[in-house]
Amino acid sequence: MIDPKTLLERAAQLTDQAKGEEDAGIRERLLRMADHYRDLAAHEAWANENPPSVGAITSALSPRAH
């Protein structure tokens, strides 16, 4: 698992880099990458706060009844 703080720091770096970019295409790509890093940080934070239970893992791995 990745520390959400690290992901948010990278997002901030990409956003700052985009501010100084003259090429609109590159600027947009950097901002999309920053958004992706923020999404990953939110996912990692949620995963850290909500670890899977043994029961959930077992039910996910067991064959489903039809």
Image: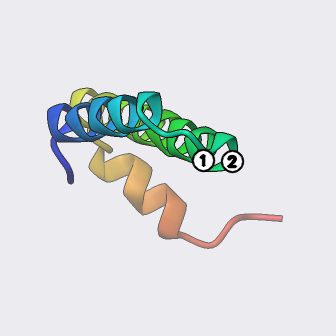
Spot occupied by residue 63 in the image (x, y as percentages of width and height)? 62, 73
Q: Residue at x 40, y 41 (%)?
A: 37
Pick out the residue farthest to the right: 66
The answer to whether residue 11 is left or right of residue 4 is right
Q: Count all numbered tags in the image, as a single digit.
A: 2
Q: Residue at x 40, y 30 (%)?
A: 15
Residue 25 is labelled as 2
Mark 2 residue element = helix
- Of residues 32 and 65, the one nearer the viewer is 32
> How many residues crowd mark 1 within 10 Å: few (<14), some (14–19), many (20+)?
few
Tell me if residue 48 comes above or below residue 30 in the rendering.
above
Q: Which residue is mark 1?
A: 29
Q: Residue at x 37, y 39 (%)?
A: 14
Q: Residue at x 21, y 53 (%)?
A: 1
Spot occupied by residue 44 in the image (x, y as percentages of width and height)? 31, 39
> How many residues crowd mark 2 within 10 Å: few (<14), some (14–19), many (20+)?
few
Tell me if residue 43 comes above or below residue 64 in the rendering.
above
Amino acid at pointer 1: Arg
The answer to whether residue 40 is left or right of residue 25 is left
Tell me if residue 54 comes above or below residue 16 in the rendering.
below
The answer to whether mark 2 and mark 1 are in CB contact below 8 A is yes
Pick out the residue farthest to the front: 22
Residue 8 is labelled as none
Mark 2 or 1: in front is 2
Spot occupied by residue 56 in the image (x, y as percentages of width and height)? 42, 48
- Of residues 41 and 26, the one nearer the viewer is 26
